[in-house]
Image (tube, rainbow, N blue to C red):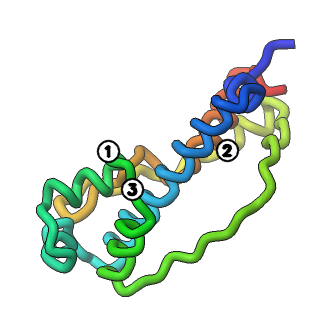
Amino acid sequence: MTSTVIERFTADPEGLRLLQQAGLIFDVTELMCATLEEQSVTRAELAKRMEKSKGRISQILNGETNLTLQTIADVFTALGKTLTVRATDICEPEPQPPEKAMQVKLPPPLPNTSKVSAAGTGTLHCLEAIVAFECSLGMGA
């Protein structure tokens, strides 16, 4: 049986750790970008509120820097929000037959505006996107 990308990553503790890191960075930066868009706040306005350069804000929102918890809290505070976190058990995604995976619809791409550009190309969590892709190719477990 052919293993999926997710299975190969999660079989190795180091791979699982890296996958967890990438997923968390993606989720947090997407939430930041969505909050900016929801509030019609530009990157320039966020930079002003945080007393940071626009370049630094771009690094944060593009996931190009190692975000500290303090920086994450600062961003959400500047947006009048608080971030709530919770821990859940690590579990493998449920395998889907290819015909079911083909029904997965990707969200429309975010509009390309001067206000906000998303950290990723869509709003699906990166792991879900990989699983859906593999299943659509018939590679799912």
Left or right: residue 1 versus residue 35 is: right
Rounded to the nearest angstrom, the CA distance separating label 1 from label 3 is: 9 Å
Q: Quadrant of the C terminus?
A: top right
Residue in the picture at 41% in, 60% down: 68
Rounded to the nearest angstrom, the CA distance separating label 1 from label 2 is: 29 Å
Q: Nearer the viewer, residue 92 or 110?
A: 92
Between discs 2 and 3, the one toward the N terminus: 3
Residue 46, given in percent of the width and then of the height, sits at 21, 73
Left or right: residue 83 versus residue 39 is: right
Three-letter amino acid code at the position of disc 2: Val
Task: Provide the residue designation for mark 2.
Answer: 104
Task: Provide the residue designation for mark 1.
Answer: 64
Residue in the picture at 47% in, 82% down: 82
**Mark 1 residue crowding within 10 angstroms, few (<14) / some (14–19) / many (20+):** few
Task: Provide the residue designation for mark 3.
Answer: 67
Q: Quadrant of the N terminus?
A: top right
Three-letter amino acid code at the position of disc 1: Glu
Three-letter amino acid code at the position of disc 3: Leu
